[in-house]
Image (tube, coloured by chain):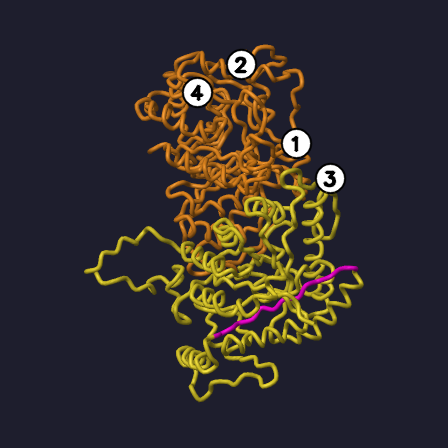
Chain colours: A orange, B yellow
């Protein structure tokens, strides 16, 4: 089976590098000379908006070998459905992985939007279903359903979405959703159903993933912990006769040499105040896990390297998850190969800045992957390094 | 009195075709499109899809200098927000009004989606909130509210959507929605809220419009004059001003005879008896035949005649205070060009003042 490698399209602006935590792409910081999309021309905004930059990132990663891009969703970001709908006709083969929380859209509406998007893109929609990090953010969205119930709602949501997908009439009486005589209209019915990437590290998430996921998606964690998490999902899934594949979301900082990569990290680290770290927010089990792999306080960036090239400090240099890979092109490719070796079927890679790094990773790292050669060796034992 | 008219087209979201019912544009009826014979090179298969057709309609409206386009909520058509996003992205000036009903999403989510579109497109998105769905249609969309509750929910929906849009730290506790410490942050804050279009002539509908509508849309089959008077009084009570609009089918040609010849041709083509061709209402000049020839259109009565005749009909509404005209004409691309080149220039003076 080929490995699907996605890129990530940042939906809340971007930095010019990891060296300075300054957003200069998109309007998340004041629009000044040097800002892009919108930029400043003759003293005024130039009429471009951040979606124009996202279109560039989509095209850059499409051209450099990625199958598609993840569009993340948070209170402060742009909306992935709106972005995918706006960009639908501006790429050719690129898949739009739409991150969303099932509670916010009605499943019939989600089905209608998805089917029209499938028609707009020729079947290039992929779902990243999140059931919510919880805490203040859920109430910001106006969602009062509590953590474990959100997974029950996700299950009903997908029942209804799949129920109407091939036409109707479809009836459903659930706790969260009731429909009567529902179904997509004929020309919209029976589009290819989007692949489902399912995220969540809690017990409730892993159980729901067993039922619904085509791919169980995790942030990068130290490889043994990741392998154990996959084993847990596999166990739940096997028990109900399903076998999801596995995907990992990984930030990558790859350079010609290992030294050059760490130099880049060090330059960013100069601006980090490691004592001013944000505590865990909400009821996200994934975030709590990621913080348990390192022991704070940390003085030097490589103290966050939990195993060769696996670095847990990305969140200090840009918004987002903590873990990613730092190293030479060759090392990063080897670590990705090792992940393929422990059962990873798909990657969502990202690097800052997303446009330039899409070219770099596509041109320098992806061609080095050997994947299949090591796939059939026993997991973990082939890994070089101390995992 | 005469206001400054703003013209929009209605985007057909169930395909389109040269003639009613043909449906060979926009991949709506599989197999309806006639390919050229095999002796002709045809490199198209696989290269185009339904949204290429919708994009053409948007470009036609943009190029023909229409002010905007309405993508109606149609449970049997393409999803309107997806269509609207594409049309907005592929135009510079066009204002696009997306129709949807309050059950499709939470108000926070609808607002969030819309904030992105406003930012992407220079604030050109509008909403038409459809509150009065047919009960069976509503149930098929998973919406089981009945009667006046629907207007109460729409009121909360618009209140919450505006609340999170304009106010950081927004909190709301209502019958239908709750938000705690919500509200958008830059760059999603500080944008113009989508222009809100509402419909209906029931007391609840007019009361809702008085509180929330930027534009209240009538149809030709309603008593527009009475509706405007009632709504103006209610809006004044709320300390607001509401604009008035009309969704109206039109069939305009060089002269009246040609327009009526075309009306007759379409009437017969869609199965009508030639002898049964209805006459326009002698008082209003509205022709009820659009219910037959309009394909999957609204089915409301509309205006038939020369450009001048149709313009006169529109001026009648202008005189009553209607300023937004959402025209409906098929096939959308050809008729949009026609309206842009021939009907809109008759209002050139007024349009100039409007912008």
The residue that mark 2 highlights is A266
Q: Residue B22 sits in which quadrant?
A: bottom left
State the image coordinates of residue B159 (x, y, percent, origin top left): 71, 52
Task: Check if mark 2 and mark 3 are on a common chain.
Answer: no
Residue depicted at x 47% and y 18%: A326
- Secondary structure of residue under mark 2: helix
Frontmost of labels 1 and 3 is 3
Frontmost of labels 1 and 2 is 2
Residue depicted at x 67% and y 19%: A276
Chain identity of mark 4: A
The residue that mark 4 highlights is A254
The residue that mark 3 highlights is B169
Q: Main secondary structure of the magenta part?
A: strand
Say few, some or many: other residues with alpha carbon within 10 Å of mark 1 (under 14 / 14 to 19 / 20 or more): some
Say few, some or many: other residues with alpha carbon within 10 Å of mark 4 (under 14 / 14 to 19 / 20 or more): many
Chain identity of mark 3: B
Task: Check if mark 3 and mark 4 are on a common chain.
Answer: no
Image: B36 above or below B292: above
User: How many angstroms separate mark 2 from mark 3 (CA)?
Assistant: 37 Å
Task: Check if mark 1 and mark 3 are on a common chain.
Answer: no
């Amino acid at each position: 089976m080929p490995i699907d490698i996605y890129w990530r399209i940042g939906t809340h602006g971007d930095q010019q590098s990891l060296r300075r935590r300054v957003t200069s792409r998109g309007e998340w910081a004041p629009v000044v000379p040097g800002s892009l999309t919108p930029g400043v021309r003759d003293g005024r905004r130039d009429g471009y908006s951040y979606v124009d930059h996202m279109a560039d990132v989509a095209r850059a990663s499409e051209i450099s070998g990625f199958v598609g891009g993840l569009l993340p969703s948070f209170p402060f970001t742009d909306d992935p459905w709106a972005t995918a709908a706006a960009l639908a006709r501006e790429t050719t083969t690129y898949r739009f992985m739409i991150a969303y929380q099932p509670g916010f859209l009605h499943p019939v509406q989600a089905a209608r939007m998805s089917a029209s998007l499938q028609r707009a893109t020729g079947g290039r929609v992929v779902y990243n279903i999140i059931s919510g990090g919880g805490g203040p953010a859920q109430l910001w969205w106006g969602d009062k359903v509590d953590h474990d119930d959100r997974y029950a709602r996700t299950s009903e949501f997908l029942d209804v979405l799949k129920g109407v997908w091939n036409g109707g009439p479809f009836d459903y009486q659930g706790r969260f959703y009731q429909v009567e005589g529902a179904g997509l209209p004929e020309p919209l019915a029976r589009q290819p159903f989007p692949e489902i990437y399912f995220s969540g590290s809690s017990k409730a998430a892993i159980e729901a993933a067993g039922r619904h996921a085509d791919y169980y998606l995790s942030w990068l964690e130290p490889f043994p912990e990741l392998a154990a998490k996959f084993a847990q999902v596999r166990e739940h899934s096997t028990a109900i006769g399903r076998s999801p594949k596995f995907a990992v979301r990984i930030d990558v900082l790859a350079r010609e040499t290992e030294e050059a990569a760490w130099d880049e990290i060090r330059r960013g680290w100069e601006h980090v105040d490691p004592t001013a770290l944000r505590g865990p927010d909400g009821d996200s089990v994934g975030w709590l896990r990621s913080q348990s792999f390192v022991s704070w306080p940390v003085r030097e960036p490589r103290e966050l390297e939990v195993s060769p090239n696996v670095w847990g400090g990305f969140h200090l240099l840009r918004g987002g998850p903590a873990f990613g890979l730092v190293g030479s092109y060759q090392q990063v490719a080897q670590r990705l190969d090792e992940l393929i070796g422990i059962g990873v079927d798909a990657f969502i890679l990202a690097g800052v800045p997303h446009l330039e790094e899409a070219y770099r990773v596509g041109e320098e790292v992806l061609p080095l992957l050997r994947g299949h050669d090591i796939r059939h060796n026993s997991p973990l034992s082939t890994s070089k390094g101390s995992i | 009195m005469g206001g400054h008219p703003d013209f929009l087209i209605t985007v057909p979201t169930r395909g389109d075709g040269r003639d009613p019912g043909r449906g060979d544009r926009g991949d709506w009826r599989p197999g309806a499109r006639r390919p050229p014979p095999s002796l002709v090179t045809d490199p198209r298969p696989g290269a185009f899809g339904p949204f290429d057709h919708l994009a053409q309609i948007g470009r036609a409206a943009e190029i023909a200098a229409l002010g905007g386009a309405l993508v109606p909520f149609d449970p049997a058509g393409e999803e309107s927000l997806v269509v609207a996003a594409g049309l907005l992205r592929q135009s510079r000036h066009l204002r696009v009004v997306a129709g949807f009903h309050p059950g499709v999403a939470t108000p926070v989510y609808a607002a969030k989606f819309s904030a992105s579109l406003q930012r992407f497109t220079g604030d050109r998105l509008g909403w038409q909130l459809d509150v009065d769905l047919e009960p069976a249609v509503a149930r098929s969309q998973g919406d089981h509210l009945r009667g006046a509750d629907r207007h109460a929910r729409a009121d909360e929906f618009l209140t919450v959507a505006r609340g999170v849009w304009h106010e950081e730290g927004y909190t709301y506790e209502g019958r239908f929605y709750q938000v705690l410490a919500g509200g958008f942050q830059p760059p999603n804050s500080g944008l113009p809220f989508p222009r809100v279009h509402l419909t209906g002539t029931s007391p609840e509908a007019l009361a809702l419009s008085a509180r929330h509508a930027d534009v209240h849309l009538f149809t030709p089959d309603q008593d527009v004059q009475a509706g405007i008077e009632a709504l103006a009084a209610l809006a004044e009570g709320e300390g607001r001003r509401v604009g008035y609009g009309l969704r109206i089918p039109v069939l305009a040609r060089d002269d009246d005879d040609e327009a009526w010849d075309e009306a007759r041709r379409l009437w017969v083509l869609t199965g009508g008896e030639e002898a049964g061709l209805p006459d326009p209402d002698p008082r209003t000049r509205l022709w009820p035949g659009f219910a037959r020839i309009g394909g999957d259109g609204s089915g409301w009565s509309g205006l038939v005649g020369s450009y001048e005749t149709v313009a006169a009909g529109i001026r009648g509404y202008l005189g009553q205070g209607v300023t937004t005209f959402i025209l409906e004409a098929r096939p959308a691309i050809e008729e949009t060009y026609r309206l842009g080149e021939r009907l809109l220039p008759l209002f050139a003076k007024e349009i100039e003042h409007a912008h």
